[in-house]
Image (tube, rainbow, N blue to C red):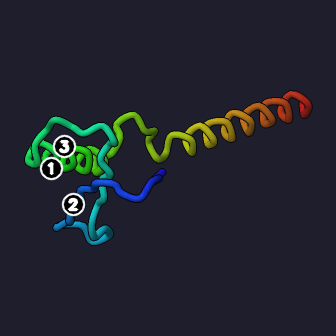
């Protein structure tokens, strides 16, 4: 949340994105002891880290596979019950 009347910012212009034009970073109130090059490198690292897909995410078909397995097991259960009642 931005409060107050003055904040220092870094605006990082994107080059290769068809979706985004720029990324804005608001510096902390306590002045960082890093130089301009270090701040830009950190901003680039944060942007590139956000562009990578998260490896911990589920596969797209994970929940669909569980649903289909449950559907198959339920169908098999009712088929066995139906066969037992027919005998």
SS under mark 2: strand
Q: Could you tell whether 60 is left or right of 46 in the image?
A: right
Marks 2 and 3, Cα distance to the nearest angstrom? Answer: 11 Å
SS under mark 3: helix
Residue at (19% x, 43% y) in the render: 42
Q: Are marks 1 and 3 in contact (CB under 8 Å)?
A: yes
In which quadrant of the rendered view does residue 83 lie?
top right
Q: Is residue 34 above or below residue 7?
A: above
Image coordinates for residue 38, horizontal then vertical, percent = 11, 42
Q: Earlier in the sequence, mark 2 or mark 3?
A: 2
Residue at (57% x, 45% y) in the render: 64
Marks 1 and 3, Cα distance to the nearest angstrom? Answer: 5 Å
Front residue of 63 and 70 = 63
Q: Which residue is mark 1?
A: 40
Q: Are marks 2 and 3 in contact (CB under 8 Å)?
A: no
Image coordinates for residue 8, horizontal then vertical, percent = 28, 54
Q: Earlier in the sequence, mark 1 or mark 2?
A: 2
* Residues packed near mark 1 inside 10 Å, few (<14), some (14 to 19) or many (20 plus): some
Q: Are marks 1 and 2 in contact (CB under 8 Å)?
A: yes
Front residue of 32 and 79 = 32
Residue at (26% x, 44% y) in the render: 49
Q: Which residue is mark 3?
A: 42
Image coordinates for residue 4, horizontal then vertical, percent = 44, 54
Q: Is residue 56 above or below residue 53?
A: above
* Residues packed near mark 2 inside 10 Å, few (<14), some (14 to 19) or many (20 plus): some
Q: Which residue is mark 2?
A: 12
Callout count: 3
Image coordinates for residue 21, horizontal then vertical, percent = 27, 70
Residue at (34% x, 54% y) in the render: 7
Q: Could you tell whether 5 is left or right of 14 in the image?
A: right
Marks 1 and 2, Cα distance to the nearest angstrom? Answer: 8 Å
């Amino acid at each position: 949340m931005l409060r107050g009347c003055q904040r220092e910012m870094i605006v990082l212009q994107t080059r290769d994105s068809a979706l985004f034009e720029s990324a804005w970073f608001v510096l902390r109130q306590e002045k960082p002891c890093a130089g301009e090059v270090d701040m830009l490198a950190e901003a680039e690292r944060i942007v590139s880290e956000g562009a990578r897909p998260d490896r911990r995410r589920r596969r797209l078909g994970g929940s669909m596979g569980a649903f289909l397995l449950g559907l198959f097991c339920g169908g098999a259960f009712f088929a066995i019950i139906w066969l037992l009642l027919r005998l």
